[in-house]
Image (cartoon, grey):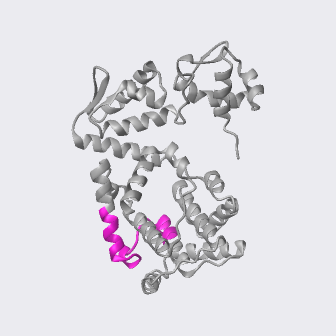
Amino acid sequence: MQKDHKKVLWEYLQANPGWHTSSELAVAIGVSTRSIKRYVKDLVDTSAIFVSEKGYKINQKITNKKPSNMSYDSVKRVLTNEFTRKQSLNVYDLSERFYLSESTLIKLLGEITHYFKSFDLELRRSGDNWFLDGDELNKRKVISDVLYRESGQTFIGTKTIQESFPDIKVKNLANNIREIANSQNIYLNVFDFNNVLLHVAIATHRAKNGYQPQSDLSKKTSAFQKNSDKNQGLIFSKQLIDQIEKNEKLKFSDEERRSLMLVIQFSITRKHRNLEDTINHETAILVDKLIKYVSSMLNIDLKSLNFRDQFAIHIQRLLERSSHGYVERNPMTSRIRKSSPIIYECAVLISNRLE
């Protein structure tokens, strides 16, 4: 298990009050001075430690607390989201929750106030409480803007996928995608490339661990393939899947192959002839209900984010797997929770509703 150097650094500073240079800390923790400076950045942002020409020193006022695992920017995004949904937030409660000093919180709230102004919203203070004043439609725009910013971070990349699926040679899968895409003159932006890579890795992981999905959708599959024989996305997905089966010495089930082809094609074409040619009518109804539910709870309109088709394919696959007793945990949950708290919140809300 990888050592949490940030935690070790925090514990060392707690046990040794006073000023310490980065060189001293590097020796004590067993990392480079450059790494020390990286680890202390979030701690400095949250006022957990002080910094000066003498080095670094713990903030005695929060010695008995644990440092927040969230970065300054992550706290900022969480608060931005909560102000759009709650009547007021108490500055002392926030200080305790995020282990921030009051001065740091005031600075952060000032930055959030400036951000809200661009949406004709005003963050006001009444005593120790802060609340967001303005039109509900503008609050909805804020949430959509934050969601776009989070999704633009591309937190799912080759390194992340490899860490999540250590039994898969993700670099080889990535090379397969690039080679076949280049041979067919297909351009994949970073988001679409990582999306294809992620789902190929998931399917390969399942096949290697003996998962064999079953489905009664063969007629829909045949109809879809018949209408798509000359589709560039279909040709690409077939070649890619065949190459992976050859390289990894495995065989995808017909159903896994079908659903994987749908996901890959969507990443290339961004559209389907008819979504209900590929999923059950009941699934389409369920997806629309889930999108409506998220809108009512979080003021996020997922329909406007070109989200429905891709999401419907995921839900169809999820229902098919769970109906046969196959359930798995997303290995990237903690990473997404930290880097993109609003996307994580949407996922938890949908998951609870599905259950």
Question: Can residue 154 be spotted in the picture?
Answer: no
Residue 82: name its quadrant: top left
Is 6 or 17 nearer to us in this picture?
Answer: 17
Residue 271 in the magenta stretch? The answer is: yes
Viewport quadrant of the C terminus: bottom left
Q: Which percent across, then down, holds residue 88?
A: 29, 31
22 up-or-down from 235: above or below: above
The tally of labels here is 0
Residue 143: name its quadrant: top left
Q: Which percent across, then down, holds residue 75?
A: 45, 34
Is 142 or 184 nearer to us in this picture?
Answer: 142
Which secondary structure dominates the residues rendered in magenta? Answer: helix
Is 136 or 232 nearer to us in this picture?
Answer: 136
68 up-or-down from 323: above or below: above
175 up-or-down from 95: above or below: below
Q: Which percent across, then down, holds residue 190?
A: 55, 54
Q: Residue at x 64, y 77 (%)?
A: 242
Please give left or right for residue 316 compared with residue 233 in the image: left
Question: Can residue 112 be spotted in the picture?
Answer: yes
Q: Residue at x 36, y 59 (%)?
A: 353
Q: Which percent across, then down, holds residue 228?
A: 46, 80
Residue furthest out toward the left: 135
The magenta stretch is 262-289
Residue 206 in the magenta stretch? The answer is: no
